[in-house]
Image (tube, rainbow, N blue to C red):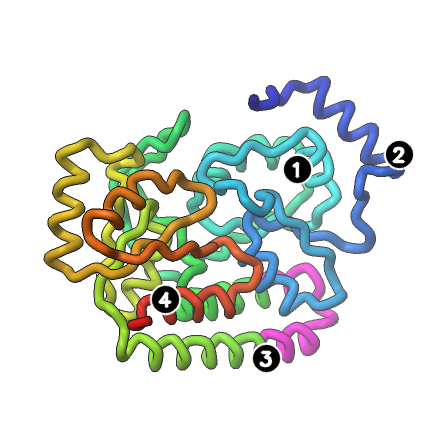
């Protein structure tokens, strides 16, 4: 059951936050991000200079998540919000978030990224207008752009420590390059096509010349006719892997796997462990 965010709840949360106690009051300077992969990238560059707080908790979908009153109140303590760019949570909540934190500066980490565009769709009770595919973090090329955007934002907030942030950014980009190299080598002997419920790996597929086939259509469960078509295209494309994501239903994937003999592989594209998860996804596409 969803909590209705009312002014009285927000006021109560602000009061509790101000009083400390068991409210998890952040220490030092704070930056808020939307998802865990952002938190990883931001922490890698910010080091001990900032406390990085994530709005969407592990296991929740950033397409549909609603923040708690306490999160809305605590946001007022953040010097900045690093948005991923176009995810459903931000589309639905950014205006409200800023109303409750008017002094918090906004930085868009998708700036400079060549976006993939998609049609509008409905996801649960939320309708997402057509526009940019928001899953930009599942790409080594994009992650480097995001790292530079984070670096520039941190320098804007804390110019005196620019050299510190530059060194940490360079270390992070070196690791992203190494991750990219491992993925590229791994996928030389991997399957070309894969099935997934939600199109989370669009940029990953674009970077490495893969064919992502999505089970959902316009954010809806597939019809019987669509399921038949998915089974046929999976056979034609010789799909051997169907990716499962923890925040989405797995029943249709199990039906297709049974009909085609494809393996079901659980992945977590929203994992904080960005490097490990990217490599694991790539290795899942190789022959067992």
Could you tell me which secondary element the residue under label 2 belongs to?
loop
Q: Residue at x 78, y 30 (%)?
A: 14
For label 1, the crowd category at 10 Å Cα-Cα, with few meaning under 14, some 14 to 19 and many 20 or more, is: few
Could you say which is closer to the camera, residue 114 or residue 88?
Answer: 88
> What quarter of the picture does the N terminus occupy?
top right
| Marks 2 and 3, how far apart at CA | 39 Å
Q: Quadrant of residue 203?
A: bottom left
| Marks 4 and 3, how far apart at CA | 27 Å
Mark 1 / mark 2, whichever is N-terminal: 2
Q: Residue at x 89, y 37 (%)?
A: 21
Residue that label 3 marks = 171
Q: Foreground mark, 4 or 3?
A: 4
Looking at the image, residue 238 sits to the left or right of residue 149; the answer is left
Q: Quadrant of residue 39?
A: bottom right
Residue that label 4 marks = 284
| Marks 2 and 4, how far apart at CA | 48 Å
């Amino acid at each position: 059951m969803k909590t209705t965010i009312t002014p009285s709840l927000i006021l109560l949360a602000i009061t509790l936050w101000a009083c400390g106690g068991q409210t998890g009051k952040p220490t030092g300077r704070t930056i808020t991000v939307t998802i865990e992969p952002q938190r990883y990238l931001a922490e890698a560059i910010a080091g001990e200079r900032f406390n990085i707080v994530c709005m969407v908790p592990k296991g929740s979908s950033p397409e549909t998540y609603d923040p708690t009153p306490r999160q809305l109140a605590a946001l007022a303590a953040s010097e900045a919000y690093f948005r991923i760019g176009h995810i459903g949570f931000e589309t639905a909540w950014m205006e409200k978030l800023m109303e409750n934190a008017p002094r918090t500066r906004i930085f868009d980490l998708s700036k400079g990224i060549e976006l993939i565009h998609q049609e509008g769709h409905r996801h649960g009770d939320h309708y997402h207008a057509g526009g940019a595919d928001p899953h930009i973090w599942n790409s080594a090329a994009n992650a480097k752009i995001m790292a530079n955007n984070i670096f520039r934002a941190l320098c804007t907030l804390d110019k005196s420590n620019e050299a510190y942030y530059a060194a940490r950014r360079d270390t992070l980009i070196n690791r992203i390059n190494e991750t990219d190299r491992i993925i590229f080598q791994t996928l030389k002997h991997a399957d070309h096509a894969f099935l997934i419920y939600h199109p989370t790996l669009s940029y990953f597929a674009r970077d490495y010349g893969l064919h992502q086939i999505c089970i959902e259509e316009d954010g809806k469960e597939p019809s019987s006719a669509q399921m038949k078509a998915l089974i046929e295209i999976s056979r034609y494309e010789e799909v051997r892997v169907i990716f499962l994501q923890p925040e989405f239903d797995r029943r249709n994937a199990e039906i297709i796997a049974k009909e085609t003999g494809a393996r079901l592989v659980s992945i977590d594209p929203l994992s904080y462990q960005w490097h490990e998860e990217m490599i694991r996804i790539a290795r899942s596409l190789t022959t067992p």
